[in-house]
Image (cartoon, helix red, strand yellow):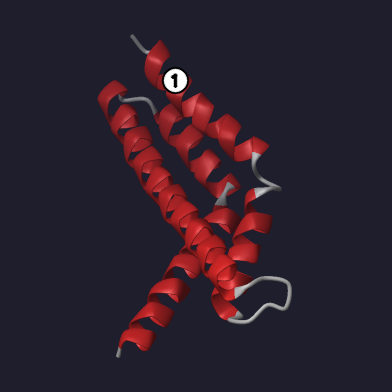
Amino acid sequence: MIDVPLTLLKAGETFATETISLLPVVWVIGLLLCIESDLPLLRSTIWRLLRNVIVALMALFLVYVVVYAIYGSAVAVYFDDHGFTNLTLRTLSTMWVSIVLALAGVVLWIHRRSRQNS
């Protein structure tokens, strides 16, 4: 009975350790696309599309992080085992740079959109 939750939490840990070097690079590119509005190599429609796709991926990543944290905490409470809490916290602490960059990208995108609409 404990195998399925442990497998899901370990899959999240594997995701965190395997993407530790790739995700921050993608998120930095997304941040640059949110900050800069005219890149010389991209037409404006391609630039906006790429920016919106990366920001959508950032938002999905943040949803994944929140769901993973809630699930890990719920499993730890259900089985009354601190090992699940430690595994969840270790996984989330591994991804802290990606989490901060994704959050900054989404907030910046929302800020720019609200400023353009007013």
Q: Residue furthest left?
A: 78
Residue 106 sits in which quadrant?
A: bottom left
- x%, y% of residue 73? 34, 37
Q: Residue at x 52, y 69 (%)?
A: 48
Q: How many marks?
A: 1
Q: Residue at x 65, y 64 (%)?
A: 29
- x%, y% of residue 93? 55, 48
Disc 1: CA contacts within 10 A as few (<14), some (14-19) or many (>=20): some
- x%, y% of residue 28? 64, 64
Image check: 95 left or right of 65? right
Q: Is residue 66 above or below residue 59?
A: above
Identify the image quadrant of the N terminus: top left
User: What residue is shown with label 1?
Assistant: 6
Q: Nearer the viewer, residue 20 or 81?
A: 20
Q: Residue furthest bottom?
A: 118
Image check: 30 left or right of 72? right
Image check: 71 left or right of 54? left
User: What's the residue type where badge 1 is placed?
Assistant: Leu
Q: Nearer the viewer, residue 38 or 25?
A: 38
Q: Secondary structure at mark 1?
A: helix
Q: Is residue 97 above or below residue 46?
A: above
Q: Residue at x 31, y 25 (%)?
A: 80
Q: Nearer the viewer, residue 44 or 70?
A: 44
Image check: 82 left or right of 15? left
- x%, y% of residue 18? 66, 36
Q: Is residue 31 above or below residue 10?
A: below
Identify the image quadrant of the C terminus: bottom left
Q: Residue at x 53, y 40 (%)?
A: 91
Q: Residue furthest top?
A: 1
Q: Is residue 117 above or below residue 110?
A: below
